[in-house]
Amino acid sequence: MEDPTMNNPHSADEYSESAISSSDHSPLHFSTRIEIDKVSDKFTQVRNEIARVIVGQKDMVDLILVALLSGGHVLLEGVPGVAKTITARLLAKTMDTSFSRIQFTPDLMPSDILGTLVFDAKKSDFEYKKGPVFTHILLIDEINRAPAKTQAALFEVMEERQVTMDGITYPMSEPFIVLATQNPIEQEGTYRLPEAQLDRFLMKIEIGYPELEDEIEILHREQRLKTIDKLAEIQKVLTGDEITAFRNIVADIAVDDSIIQYIARIIVQTRQSSMLYLGASPRASIALLKTSRSLAALKGRDFVTPEDIKQMAYPVIGHRVVVAPEKEMEGLTAEMIIKQIVDSIEIPR
């Protein structure tokens, strides 16, 4: 018998939505579709505001927004001058939240970022003066220039979103996201981030040079603006409460069991691959699940597809694995290996 939906491109979707809304046992309801549209529309406004200053770098902006919606931290890696720092500032400008920037240097101490106890003569007691880490959006410039002691001070605040000082715990305000930058070329006077520190980042975004057309547009725009402040006219389009609400909406997106198995197979294969010395941890699989849901929401969908998983695989997994020394000598990179692993696993239908 002929399927009645075959000749009508909309009827299949209408049937699916009707079935979802009429089932009391379904984890999704028709209203979810509308809420996802709100998320997508709002973040499109953020993209448009950032695009008023940043030319190109669409992938970088999209991935940062995925991290913001997923509630995770981002490591931006690229040579100087590819808009790492200004993008973080622009994101903060589009949000009605607090923002702090810390320039990491070799002489930076943990108390410089976390805060310290100061003696109050009036109260005859010590008072905790909070450091710049207490904010909603924290930009850490050149994170690998600070010594290991200062880098380690970020462990608790990034993972548990709190600071413990003198036995007292001070929680961070939500939303809280760390955007850290580092330069992969200049290594003199830097301190390489250990694997445990890298694993605290939801994703690592590698930023390349712009294409020729984008480079020309950058010059044209600079010529037009001249001495005008590029950030002055950026509008605030997101509030902290909206971000929290959107995260709750995205967390309710149902993911098919075949997609979950697909994620698990990719992660397990990184541990079994002879090309990798260190595979991805369960934290990576959770991160891949979260980011794929956020990516689907930004695209206006209330379901996750295998393409979402493929798109997020390297940014989420790449910095969590270590290439086997012999394969590294052969010229293989983590990106190449992860692509091979993803391509070798059957896509769920």
Image (cartoon, rainbow, N blue to C red):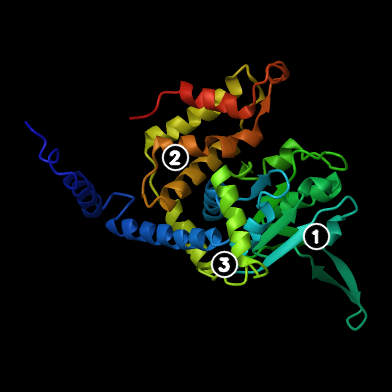
Residue 308, numbered circle: 2
Q: Viewer-nearest of labels 1 and 2? A: 2
Residue 41, numbered circle: none
Residue 95, numbered circle: 3
Q: How busy is the neighbourhood of tag 1: few (under 14 within 10 Å), some, or many (20 plus)?
A: some
Amino acid carrying label 3: it is Met
Label 3 vs 2, first from the N-terminus = 3
Task: Give percent across and percent down for residue 248.
Answer: 46, 58
Read off the residue under disc 1: 113
Q: CA distance from mark 1 to mark 3?
A: 22 Å
> Is residue 160 in view?
no
Residue at horizontal 14 percent and vertical 41 percent from the top = 5
- In this orientation, which residue lies closer to the viewer: 209 or 258? 209
Label 1 vs 3, first from the N-terminus = 3
Amino acid carrying label 1: it is Ile
Label 1 vs 2, first from the N-terminus = 1
Residue at horizontal 50 percent and vertical 58 percent from the top = 47
Does 113 appear above or below 315? below
Q: CA distance from mark 3 to mark 2?
A: 26 Å
- In this orientation, which residue lies closer to the viewer: 9 or 323? 9
Quadrant housing residue 314? top right
Task: Give percent across and percent down for residue 108.
Answer: 87, 55
Q: How busy is the neighbourhood of tag 2: few (under 14 within 10 Å), some, or many (20 plus)?
A: many
Q: CA distance from mark 1 to mark 2?
A: 36 Å
> Is residue 299 in view?
yes
Task: Give percent across and percent down for residue 283.
Answer: 59, 39
**Callout 1: helix, strand or loop?**
helix
